[in-house]
Amino acid sequence: MAKGSESKKRIGVMGGTFDPVHLGHTGVAEAALIEAELDEVIFMPAYIQPFKQDRYVADGSDRFKMLELATIHDDRLKVSSWELEQETVSYTYDTICHLIEEENYKDIFFLMGSDSMMQLERWMHGEDLLKICNFVVGLRPTNVRKQVKEEAKRLSDTYGTKIVLLEKTMLPISSTIIREKVSEGQPIAGLVSPLVEEYIYANELYI
């Protein structure tokens, strides 16, 4: 996009390690497209996630490729390598600032689970992030909707941010469980897309 050309698109951004991307991730993105009336969702794989600096993760090129395969069915789902290219710890605030200042996006919604929203003010520059970005929140199966709604209202009233709570509950899938199943020789069909499943086995990831 040419610098100085402001995008009128209403975009979602989903960050994370995506090690690997699974149907829970894409399910939230697809629900957000509908319920938050987004034009597109950008998946932003982290180079290093702040909360996972002490854990080995698959190479960024593998995680990026799996995201491309997982989103190939819908051209409204995009994948960006920007955080990977920075080769440093990936902070959501820096990413959103980049999208606003360099890509000229103005109507940005960051996608997250309800457990992350409950901790948002404790993130690096969390309070500043709440002032410049809106949010789409998927309810974790273990979270109580009443508590999440109360916290979303408090954050909205305090910082002026828009928070859209998805009606669709997030699928109870985790990347950790998928990695464990692969390492133990158990099937992962139904947890990841068929193309991602094929890529994991073809490249002997998590074995």
Image (tube, rainbow, N blue to C red):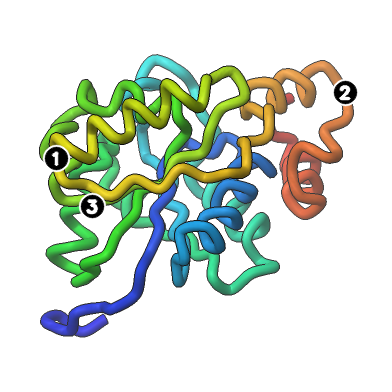
Q: Are marks 2 and 1 in contact (CB under 8 Å)?
A: no
Dot label at residue 183: none
Camera-side residue: 29 or 144?
A: 144
Dot 1 alpha-carbon crowd within 10 angstroms: few under 14, some 14 to 19, many 20 or more: some
From the viewer's perspective, is the residue at label 3 or at label 2 nearer?
A: 3
Q: Horizontally, is 102 left or right of 204 in the view?
A: left
Q: Which residue is mark 3?
A: 96
Label 1 sits on what residue type? Answer: Tyr
**Residue 101 x, y percent position in the rendering:** 13, 64
Residue at the spot x=35%, y=68% of the render? 10
- Sequence-wise, the earlier of marks 2 and 1 is 1
Label 3 sits on what residue type? Answer: Ile
Q: Which residue is mark 2?
A: 186
**Residue 125 x, y percent position in the rendering:** 14, 33
Q: Which residue is mark 1?
A: 159
Report how far apart the C-alphas of labels 3 and 2 lie in the structure.
Answer: 38 Å
**Residue 49 x, y percent position in the rendering:** 36, 30
- The kind of secondary structure element at disc 2 is loop
Q: Which quarter shows the N terminus?
A: bottom left
Residue at the spot x=35%, y=48% of the render? 110
| Image vertical order of residue 20 relative to residue 76, above or below | above
Report how far apart the C-alphas of labels 2 and 1 lie in the structure.
Answer: 45 Å
Q: Horizontally, is 19 left or right of 121 in the view?
A: right
**Residue 109 x, y percent position in the rendering:** 34, 54
Dot 3 alpha-carbon crowd within 10 angstroms: few under 14, some 14 to 19, many 20 or more: many
Camera-side residue: 99 or 46?
A: 99
